Image (cartoon, rainbow, N blue to C red):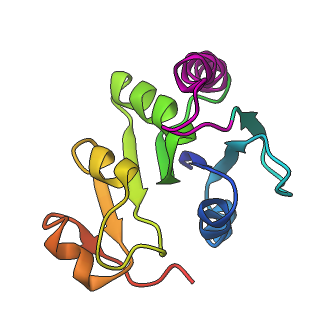
Amino acid sequence: MAKICLVSSSGGHYEQLKRLKALEEEHDIFWVTEKTGFKSSADYYLNQTGLKDKWFPWKMVKNFGGSLKIWFKEKPDYIITTGTMVALPLCFIAKLFGKKIIFIETFARVYDGTKAGKLMYKYADLFIVQWEPLLEIYPDAVYGGSIY
């Protein structure tokens, strides 16, 4: 039984990941998202941030520290994410420890990729797109169809 971390920002990214809830039937799953007003039932919460946030560097340092605590407590085999910035520290740690990363580009992007997707495309062990036109941007990706 694999241990899987499902991590994403709040809102639509998190709702997409929730579509993978069936993985709990065969795997040990835990959830990570951002602390926001968005209702969620995650196991762990990290700070919400983005590139335009003036506190971005500080929040990413805090998220990296929080991600390390989560990592050493849970010891996942896989990270599955739809992005965004909250997922980067856990993905970085996964690479350091030789674990696998599965990135699913958000359903909201049909013709252009996200910044997180363009970064993670280089590092993900499996990169999945939900729209065929994205294969032009991510030629080595796998078209998986809609997560919905």
Q: Position of residue 79 (x, y in %)?
A: 48, 45
**Quadrant assignment, res 110:** bottom left
Residue drawn at 29 percent across, 77 percent down: 111
Q: Position of residue 124 (x, y in %)?
A: 30, 47
Residue drawn at 38 percent across, 35 percent down: 99
Q: Position of residue 109 (x, y in %)?
A: 40, 73
Residue drawn at 32 percent across, 63 percent down: 113
Residue 110 sits above or below residue 121 on the image: below
Residue 4 sits above or below residue 96 on the image: below
Residue 146 sits above or below residue 87 on the image: below
Instruction: Report the magenta residues as a range.
Output: 48-72
Residue 11 seen in the figure = yes
Task: Depth check: give the residue in front, 13 or 6.
Answer: 13
Q: Position of residue 106 (x, y in %)?
A: 46, 67
User: Which image quadrant: the C terminus?
Assistant: bottom right
Q: Is residue 75 left or right of residue 125?
A: right
Magenta stretch: includes residue 42: no
Residue 124 seen in the figure = no
Q: Is residue 36 left or right of residue 97?
A: right
Residue 88 sits above or below residue 15 on the image: above
**Quadrant assignment, res 46:** top right
Magenta stretch: includes residue 69: yes
Magenta highlight: main SS: helix
